[in-house]
Each structure stands twice: as C-alpha cells, then as structure tokens.
Amino acid sequence: MALIEWDDDRYSTNIDRFDEQHQNLFELLNDLHQAMEEGHAEEELGDILRELERYTEYHFGDEEEFMEDCGYSQDCADCFHNHQEMHENFASKVTELRQKHEDGEYITMEVLEFARDWLDSHIAGGDQDQNYSEYFQNEVDSYEFD
Ligand SMILES: [Fe+2]
Ligand SMILES: [Fe+2]
C-alpha cells in the first residue's frame, strides 16, 4: 500500500509544475517505503534517498524562486521567511537521513511517516504551499511563468 496518495482536492496548488513536483516527491517517498517493506538491498535504498535529497532541494529552490518572482516574498516577507525556514529544516532532515543510511544506520518507518506527515501538512496545511498558490491566483492572474 502506498504511504501517501495524491488527491487533487487536498493537495492541488492549481499550478501544474508544482503539482507535478509534489507528485514526484510522493512517488519517491512511496518508492522508499515499498523498497523498505520488500526488504530491498541497502544499495537501492541509498539510491532512492540520494534522489529524494536532490529532488527535495530542487523543488524547494524552484518554489522559493517562484515566491520571489510573483511578488509574494515582498508582500509577505514573514510568510516567505517562515516558508524558507521550513524548507531548510526539512531538507536538512533528508540529508541527515541519507547520511545515517550511508553510515549503516537502519531507517525506521517512523522516519518515513514523519516525512509523509510533513509533506502533507506543508502542502495542504493552508499556511505554506497553498498559501503562495492562493496569493498567486488572487493577485497575479496575468503573471507569465516559463
Ligand atoms: Fe512544495
Ligand atoms: Fe514549500
């Protein structure tokens, strides 16, 4: 069973590229979960963890750039800084996880559940990802992004 499943009503930001990125993050988390459940080789877990680390950083960077480009970071500097701080904390947790695994430590299901809950509330909690998307929908309808 999947650890986390996409649900448009719950998770959509109405911005295609971020919905796709969030779906990719869910997929990586599910891959990791499945590999652990099926007792796959440590090497495979390491590959998924490295990809999760890389993709998390890519996604957070893209979101932060977007928040700056659309004016959100100027209109609500506190929201932006708070959001950035949450990204930094989560990214360092993922790095820590990847490092622990490389040092031979066992990754527990609790850690995966923590990552799932974090993503769930970060995207759907209303005060983070759906906050910038709401701002974008309301304020800058004509904004063009690449
Ligand atoms: Fe996000
Ligand atoms: Fe975010």
Image (spheres, rainbow, N blue to C red):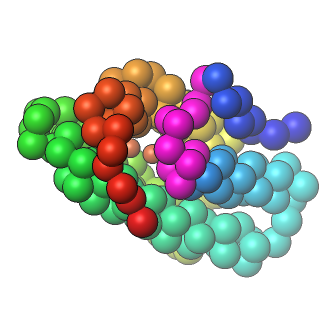
Q: Residue at x 20, y 53 (%)?
A: 68
Q: Relative to 57, say whether 11 is above or below.
A: above
Which of the 4 image quadrants contains residue 40?
Answer: bottom right
Which of the 4 image quadrants contains residue 78?
Answer: top left
Residue 72 falls left or right of residue 88: left
Q: Residue 32: x and y, percent?
A: 72, 56
Q: Residue at x 50, y 26 (%)?
A: 124
Is residue 112 shown to the viewer in this render? yes
Q: Residue 57: x and y, percent?
A: 41, 64
Q: Residue at x 20, y 40 (%)?
A: 72
Q: Residue 121: x and y, percent?
A: 48, 27
Q: Is residue 132 magenta?
A: no
Q: Nearer the viewer, residue 144 or 131?
A: 144
Q: Nearer the viewer, residue 4 or 12?
A: 12
Residue 85 falls left or right of residue 138: left
Residue furthest out toward the front: 142
**Main secondary structure of the magenta stretch:** helix
Q: Nearer the viewer, residue 123 or 142?
A: 142
Q: Relative to 43, say whether 109 is above or below.
A: above
Q: Residue 146: x and y, percent?
A: 42, 66
Residue 42 falls left or right of residue 80: right
Q: Relative to 128, say whether 115 is above or below.
A: below
Tell me the quadrant of the picture where the N terminus can be found: top right
Which residue range is magenta in the image? Answer: 10-19
Ligand 1 in which quarter: top left
Q: Nearer the viewer, residue 90 or 58?
A: 58
